[in-house]
Image (tube, rainbow, N blue to C red):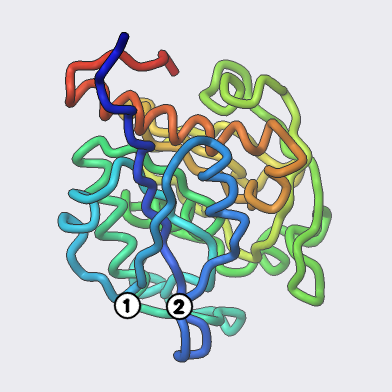
């Protein structure tokens, strides 16, 4: 009989956002997908300045979607399409991304989260996709709602291994994207109009990010849920390394 206590689920930190200066919030699908993967989600507000303290209490990090990143953080002038900017959140999440990457804590960036990782590592952004690349593909409709479109998964990439597909139908909800990609990153997927849709970090297998919103469709699409499964598995593997216990290979 094994009398050892049951292993606790990995703690997954989710960045929340401020809504109209009155409340912190986050779409419930993020937490649902983390729970489905076997993780324990916790939310933290954007005003948390202590990246090291947050990361010392969690096993992985999800940088979630939200408003635009201030161009001040990548040295550009502001386009008139920029909206919902919260510099405190930008600064906090850029610090979190850098600290998590340095400490090799698993990170999943989602939409804005991908952009945060790119900016944190020295890249910059297209501030308005219709102005920059046209409207061949709708990445967000005129009512600012999500739209579905296909992305092309590049061969021999982390996304290809996670999803097991060479194309994915994804839920898109953004008007910004990577312009100049940070040198440390590698493209995993693109849209047919050339927008970079997923990246990883060859020198750090615990960093992955997508430009779309997998949480929107994860409940009914195992290829999207697989992204959260990957994160929780990487977190469990990190715990196992630290404690000397075995973990499922991911």
Q: Residue at x 47, y 49 (%)?
A: 109
Residue ID for mark 1: 88
Question: Mark 2 — residue?
Answer: 24
Residue 154 in sight from this viewpoint: yes
Residue 155 coordinates in the image, percent (x, y): 62, 18
Relative to 182, say whether 206 is above or below.
Answer: above
Whether residue 184 appears in this view of the structure is no
Q: SS of the residue at dot 1?
A: helix
Q: CA distance from mark 1 to mark 2?
A: 13 Å
Q: Nearer the viewer, residue 198 or 249?
A: 249
Residue 41 in percent (x, y) is at 43, 51
- Residue 76: image location, x then y, percent: 41, 71
Q: Is residue 187 left or right of residue 50?
A: right
Numbered tag placed on residue 2 in the rendering: none
Q: Residue at x 56, y 40 (%)?
A: 198
Name the residue at 22% across, 50% down. 57
Judge from the rendering whether residue 115 lies leftward or rightward of residue 98; answer left or right. Answer: right
Which quadrant is home to the N terminus? Answer: top left
Question: As displayed, is residue 71 above or below residue 1?
Answer: below
Question: In front here: 42 or 214?
Answer: 42
């Amino acid at each position: 009989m094994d009398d050892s206590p049951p292993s606790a689920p990995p703690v997954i930190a989710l960045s929340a956002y401020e809504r109209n200066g009155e409340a912190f919030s986050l779409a419930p699908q993020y937490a649902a997908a983390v729970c489905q993967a076997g993780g324990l989600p916790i939310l933290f507000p954007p005003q948390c300045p202590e990246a090291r303290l947050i990361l010392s209490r969690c096993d992985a990090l999800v940088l979630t979607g939200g408003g635009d990143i201030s161009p001040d953080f990548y040295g550009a002038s502001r386009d008139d399409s920029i909206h919902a900017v919260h510099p405190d959140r930008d600064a906090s999440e850029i610090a979190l991304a850098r600290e998590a990457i340095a400490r090799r804590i698993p990170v999943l960036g989602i939409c804005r989260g991908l952009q945060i990782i790119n900016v944190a590592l020295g890249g910059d952004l297209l501030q308005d996709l219709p102005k920059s690349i046209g409207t061949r593909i709708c990445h967000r409709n005129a009512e600012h709602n999500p739209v579905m479109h296909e992305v092309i998964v590049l061969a021999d990439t982390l996304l290809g291994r996670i999803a097991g597909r060479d194309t994915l139908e994804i839920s898109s909800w953004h008007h910004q994207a990577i312009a100049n990609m940070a040198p440390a990153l590698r493209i995993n997927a693109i849209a047919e109009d050339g927008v970079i849709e997923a990246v990883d970090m060859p020198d750090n297998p615990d960093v992955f990010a997508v430009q779309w919103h997998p949480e929107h469709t994860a409940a009914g699409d195992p290829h999207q849920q697989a992204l959260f499964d990957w994160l929780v598995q990487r977190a469990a593997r990190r715990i196992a390394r630290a404690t000397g216990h075995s973990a499922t290979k991911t």
